[in-house]
Image (cartoon, rainbow, N blue to C red):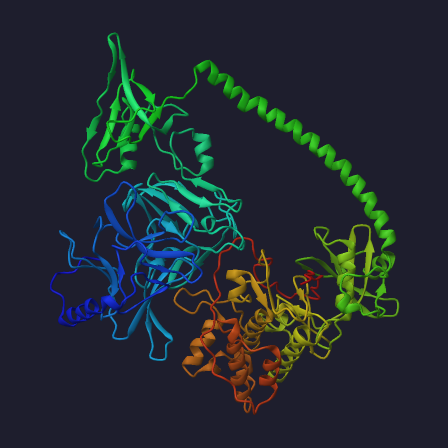
Amino acid sequence: MEWMNDNVVMEEVVFFLLILCSLPSIASSLQSDTLHQGDVLNASDESDLLVSANENYTLGFFMPERTKRTYLAIRPYSGSDNPVWIGNRDAPLPANSSASLQIDASGRLLILTHDEGQGNSYLISSKKTSLNVTATLLDSGNLVLREVNTDGSFGEELWSSFDNPTDTLLPGMKLGVDRRTGRNWALRSWKDDDIPAAGAFSLEWEPSKRRLVIKYRGVVHWTSGELMNATDFQHIGGTTNYFVNISTKEEEYFSCLPTLNPHLPLEFRQGWRLEPLGILNISSDTGSIMDLGDCNGFENETLELKGCELWEQPKCRDDGQTFEERSGKFVYHAENGVLPIQSIPIYNSSYNISDCREYCWNNCDCVGYRSNSERVCECWMGTFLQFEEGISIGNSGNTEYVYVLNRPAKGKSRIKKWICRILIPTAISLLLLGLLVLWWRRTKQEKARKEQELKDLLTLDDYTDIHELNNGENVNIKVFSYEWIVDTTNNFSLNCKLGQGGFGAVYKGITPEGQEVAIKQLSEKSKQGIVEFKNEVVLIAKLQHTNLVKLLGFCIHKDQKMLIYEFMPNKSLDFYLFDPNPIGYLSWKRRLNIIEGTAQGLLYLHKYSRVRIIHRDMKVSNILLDENMNPKISDFGIAKILKQNVTEANTMRLVGTFGYMAPEYVLHGVFSMKSDVYSFGVLLLEIVSGKKNNGFRSEDGPLNLVEHAWELWNKDAVLQLVDPSLISNNLCGNEEQLRRCINVGLICVEDSAVDRPPMDDVVSMLTNENLALPKPKKPAFVSRFNVGDTFQDGQSRKFTVNELSTSTMEAR
């Protein structure tokens, strides 16, 4: 952004003259969320504003308190008056400016002014276009300049305030680097409380260490510590935000997602502000404000825990000393009365309030400082100076920042250290011991209560939770004894163990009648209660479909809960697709049968079962194969059950498998039937190609299988995606089926959930060769998200067999 020369091109002069002629017909106050070409936003009228659709934010000119300067700013509609974005922070306008915000004939957003001493115009965006252009203030606080096509739809985004942050990070903004343009997204503090110009502190993202840093003139001052999970850093916790760290060929950035608590007032959801003294203000979910990065003083142990980067301090300074903000003046008590003390001015045009503090801290004679109205740093020197409260400085009544010597005497310091290092830890240890004894007694009582509860719950007569599934019918399911389980599994022998899933171990058993079964022993870490577990048993028992694994019965023994399923002799699909030395060969006919059978099973869950079931973990390892290589969907461990009139829901915790999760689920916690459709699309492409979605590691190549398939589709070379083992075994006559399957797979992984087809349409597209298929749109490349431990299983487990577990009930 820069001031333009006074000589503008003729077409712009004509355009501005037309605007001046039309001013009488323009309303004195803009109360829309959009600025069109020909509209004017005047600095002279405080009510002349853009207001976002839901009245979250406004855009207009404002003048900070005690400053005779005018700025273009985005501010909250109500609540805090702090701007979240300044458009001309380094080029302020005078008070009572006649400037205006407009969009010129070339589609550039600029401030026009004829104020004395100012240029003709100040460019905010510089990209030119021949199309119609509008600037819209969104409810997120983002001001977006976009082309408008002739049909009224939006075209290219030319500029946005989110791409040009000042001192505030709003949800959805980025901190990091755009590798395509070299742009670095970072916050810069104000110079001081009244001057929005760029100050000494910056907030930046360090991708190599996955941390945020506050820098003081380029030197790290404070760090958040490593991003631990989706909600916490090492030194930041308790916010209302979810965090994402995204790394691609094009971008590397950190971003906050909007809070999932819509009832929190807007002022506590407005993001993070970097203060002029290098303190980061973050809203918490309790409605309070957390101050981070306060590294005044140098009590090393405390500051290190807060994330402060420590360096050598002046030897004259002591632990616990810091600056406090007070109003008053320094005086010297002499024998003949009280004498005022003159400050020593420090003249440096680049100094701001943080530099003044740094100068005073490093000068051992300095006991206080302030930045006066002329922005000159004033320091007070002398050991015997006293500060008197409530006395204004001169006639201005300004506030001084005063250095307070609050270190206790040596004797008191030893007592304080003894209390902190011995007495308090001892008291805490005794308290913990008492709590441990109390916990042990309650655990013993709880165990006795559970044993009694088990005796009362060994039948299914008290099943009441899911009335949609019961309807007065008897549940045809068997309760197995623990002794039967022990005999069947040879006392849970390792020789009988088939695998280890996320929710427990799976064993193979042979009944006295010679039937092979799979027994899932749920982990003791499971939080599910007895009644909920039995309700789940009824749910899975009622899901009768040829492409779903069948539940035979269950067993409850003390705290152990077990499920008995039909045995799948041909293991799981990943055993054949991804094994580098596969034992068996999957022909195209078998693969197509697996694709269609899986689609039929998923359609049953979505549409034809008595409640709507979202599987949420559709992947190759959860497709088991019977003796005829027919597919059966397994593992309902993280499934969600919705009533038939409910189409989607939200979750506060993400679980699933990396690479199969839909973008709306990863970014916003929204899941629906279309989330399963996305996972099915990834699964379909894996079956056709024989490659894992997350098996791509090249820095210059595609991020994942989905992007690779999309690139081949655009090159009209989709058959290059096909598994080489299929090509070598003669695919003559099946090329059209392969193209059709790849087309369906790409339609299922489209970015917008609305654009993805429901499963009944997917089944029709797969089975009806005469049905015309739509062309796929650009898919969502969900890859390389680093969101801590929000994923239940970081990648597909190899060769999983009967890896089944109970669902999570969610009545809605």
**Position of residue 415 measured from the top left corner of the image (x, y, whole percent):** 51, 17
Query: Up-down: is 456 above or below 650?
Result: above
From where the camera sits, is residue 575 visible? yes
Image position of 381 (left or right of 277): left
Which quadrant of the rendered structure holds the N terminus?
Answer: bottom left
Query: Up-down: is 153 above or below 357?
Result: below
From where the camera sits, is residue 586 visible? no
- Residue 581 location, quadrant: bottom right
Q: Residue at x 31, y 58 (%)?
A: 48
User: Which of the two residues, 54 or 658, is positioned nearer the viewer here?
Assistant: 54
Which quadrant of the rendered structure holds the C terminus?
Answer: bottom right
**Position of residue 626 measured from the top left corner of the image (x, y, whole percent):** 72, 75
- Residue 147 location, quadrant: bottom left
- Residue lying at the far left of the rendered structure: 7
User: Which of the two residues, 721 or 751, is positioned nearer the viewer here?
Assistant: 751
**Position of residue 660 measured from the top left corner of the image (x, y, whole percent):** 55, 67
Image position of 66 (left or right of 751): left
**Position of residue 760 measured from the top left corner of the image (x, y, whole percent):** 62, 80
